[in-house]
Image: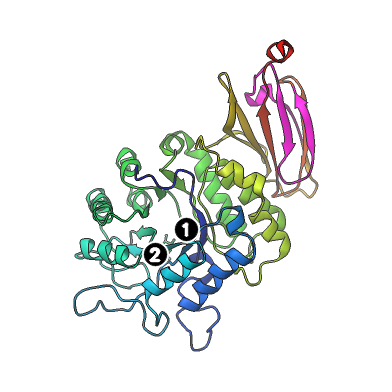
């Protein structure tokens, strides 16, 4: 969507995967979906250094609402859990220098059964603008997928007509794919800033594997739709929760950067362990995800449990790109796997070579020619991610 927003994939914090639809503030006041939870997370995004490395959006998901609209038909935040109202929460988030996201559903109900936007598209878009919302996720439960080709553009039209810039996140294609339909991606790219292509992420390595398998297996259809202002969304970062090991967490961060994915953390920032926080705050990997060229990377090798993923990034030189290269070990046979490959075999041909460094370890490989063998040792369910920055051809360099 060409609304000047999301020129790089959005970064922030989204409640759903970690906090779900916990509405029991009586028995679980610290973890229920409430204004207190989002204020606390906004505070921590700033105080714990996440904002400094680019995390910007604090996003509410399902279950924020009263079960009934107001007398005038407006959406109302749950009076017990959001007593100050959404506008006040948005103001608080803005006071921390962050941006505020909200959730609704193109249907009669949200997935958790709260009021959906059907019948109130213009009013709900206007309400979100009045509340100074900066990002809207529109889910697709309780709707006919065949209605979505009209419905999602229509809601986006109403958002645009408010005059307030709001990132528009669409669940549109995933529900059509579930219904066996072929999504109209040119329309989705035109009307949405990001969209979900596949299942909800759950807190497990298995769930993560199915998602990046899907993105690798369907990459020829998926990759061309990505670019500044319009991104594929493989769902939230689950780093720091319960289901991923340290190695698997490094793998998700590396692959999300290769996929030019939104970096929407869904984790309890109050209890996250330092080594997981360090993965989320890895500036070198965030720089890959946020690369201004906005070219989504692809899986270029997959064999006997070893995968290699490559993303073209800046700087470029003549018609050569720089690259991020991720080596993933899907094997579980105990010992780290050795991978030896030349840059040329990976498609990096620049005669002037590439300056290569590891983005997790403080290791530099120096300037390598396309013919140089690179050897990496990758831990089971882990990753090695390198950056290969293109170098001018020697001839040119010798002129100076
Ligand atoms: O209720 C909202 C929740 C989150 O927003 C996810 O990101 C959305 O993809 C949808 N969603 C859920 S749990 N959707 C859903 C998942 C399984 C199911 F059987 C019925 C609905």
Q: Position of residue 391 (x, y in %)?
A: 68, 23
User: Element type at marker 1?
Assistant: loop
In this view, the residue in front, 86 or 268, is 86
Q: Quick check: can you spot residue 107?
A: no
Which residue range is magenta in the image? 339-368
User: Is 276 left or right of 118, judged from the image as shown?
Assistant: right
User: Is 364 left or right of 386, judged from the image as shown?
Assistant: right
Q: Is mark 1 within 8 Å of ligand 1?
A: yes
In this view, the residue in front, 384 or 120, is 120
Q: Circle 2 is placed at which residue position?
A: 102
Specify few, some or many for label 1: CA neighbours under 10 Å numbering under 14, 14-19, or 20 or more.
Answer: some
Q: Position of residue 318 (x, y in %)?
A: 57, 18
Q: Is residue 364 magenta?
A: yes
Q: Residue at x 33, y 59 (%)?
A: 140
Quadrant (top left/top right/bottom left/bottom right) for the N terminus: top left
User: Is 144 left or right of 25, judged from the image as shown?
Assistant: left
In this view, the residue in front, 13 or 347, is 13
Q: Which mark is residue 200?
A: 1
Q: CA distance from mark 1 to mark 2?
A: 18 Å
Q: Are marks 1 and 2 in contact (CB under 8 Å)?
A: no
């Amino acid at each position: 969507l060409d609304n000047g927003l999301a020129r790089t994939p959005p970064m922030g914090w989204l409640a759903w995967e970690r906090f779900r639809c916990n509405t029991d503030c009586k028995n679980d006041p610290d973890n229920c979906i409430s204004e207190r939870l989002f204020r606390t997370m906004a505070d921590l995004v700033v105080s714990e250094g996440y904002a400094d490395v680019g995390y910007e959006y604090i996003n509410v998901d399902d279950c924020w609402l009263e079960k009934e609209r107001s007398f005038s038909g407006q959406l109302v935040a749950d009076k017990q859990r959001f007593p100050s109202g959404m506008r006040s929460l948005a103001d608080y988030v803005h006071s921390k220098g962050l941006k505020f996201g909200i959730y609704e559903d193109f249907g009669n109900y949200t997935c958790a059964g709260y009021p959906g936007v059907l019948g109130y598209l213009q009013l709900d878009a206007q309400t979100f603008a009045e509340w100074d919302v900066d990002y809207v996720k529109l889910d697709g439960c309780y709707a006919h997928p065949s209605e979505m080709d009209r419905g999602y553009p229509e809601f986006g039209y109403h958002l645009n007509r408010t005059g307030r810039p709001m990132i528009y996140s669409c669940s549109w294609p995933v529900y059509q794919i579930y219904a066996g339909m072929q999504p109209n991606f040119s329309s989705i790219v035109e009307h949405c800033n990001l969209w979900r292509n596949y299942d909800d992420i759950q807190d497990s390595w298995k769930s993560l594997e199915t998602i990046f398998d899907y993105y690798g297996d369907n990459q020829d259809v998926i990759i061309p739709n990505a670019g500044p202002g319009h991104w594929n969304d493989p769902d939230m970062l689950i780093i720091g929760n319960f289901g991923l090991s340290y190695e698997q967490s490094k793998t998700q961060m590396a692959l999300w950067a290769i996929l030019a994915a939104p970096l929407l953390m869904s984790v309890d920032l109050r209890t996250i362990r330092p080594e997981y926080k360090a993965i989320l705050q890895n500036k070198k990997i965030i720089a890959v995800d946020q690369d201004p060229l906005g070219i989504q990377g692809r899986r270029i090798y997959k064999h006997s449990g070893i995968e290699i993923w490559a993303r073209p990034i800046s700087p470029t030189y003549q018609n050569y790109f720089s690259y991020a290269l991720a080596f993933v070990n899907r094997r579980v046979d105990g010992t780290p796997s050795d991978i030896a490959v030349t840059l040329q075999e990976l498609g990096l041909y620049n005669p002037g070579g590439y300056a290569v460094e590891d983005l997790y370890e403080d290791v530099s490989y120096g300037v390598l020619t396309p013919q140089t063998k690179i050897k990496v040792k990758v831990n089971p369910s882990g990753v090695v991610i390198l950056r290969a920055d293109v170098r001018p051809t020697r001839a040119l360099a010798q002129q100076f």
